Image (tube, grey):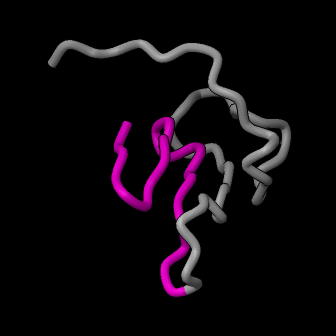
Amino acid sequence: MYYGDNVGPTFGRDIDIYVEMGNGSKEYNYCQCKQKYYERGIRDKEDLFLIEDYEVFQIIKKND
């Protein structure tokens, strides 16, 4: 998982959440789901979605 100033969690690139540059906003305004990494899809639809539809239920820290 990668995080940055403009990037939220990516979940193997199946869910991308980030701030689109150039619109002056600091809110996550681009959220897309598309099956690329995981064997099964995370959502039923592969499309853009609102951040309000998203909920983190558990975060597990990896020891690298």
**57 displayed left or right of 19:** right
**Percent x, y for residue 22?**
51, 86
Residue at 81% over, 40% down: 53
Name above or below for residue 59 compared with residue 28.
Answer: above
Q: Is residue 59 above or below residue 36?
A: above
In the displayed structure image, the side of residue 26 where residue 55 appears, left or right: right
Q: Is residue 16 above or below residue 39?
A: below
> Which span is picked out in magenta?
1-22
Residue 48: x %, y % from top left: 76, 59
Pinpoint residue 18: horizontal percent, then vertical percent.
53, 59
Q: Is residue 57 above or below residue 20?
A: above
Foreground residue among 49 and 13: 49
Q: Quadrant of the C terminus?
A: top left
Q: Position of residue 15 (x, y in %)?
A: 59, 45
Relative placement, left or right, of 39 versus 33 is left
Q: Nearer the viewer, residue 16 or 7?
A: 7
Question: Residue drawn at (33%, 15%), measured in percent from left and top?
Answer: 61
Q: State the residue in front, 11 or 40.
A: 11
Secondary structure character of the magenta stretch overall: loop
**Quarter of the figure with residue 58:** top right
Residue extending furthest toward the left: 64
Q: Residue at x 43, y 61 (%)?
A: 6
48 in magenta: no
Name the outermost residue toward the bottom.
22
| Residue at (68, 49) in percent of width and height | 33
State the image quarter where residue 52 is shown.
top right
- Tally of numbered discs: 0
Position of the N terminus, as image quadrant, is top left
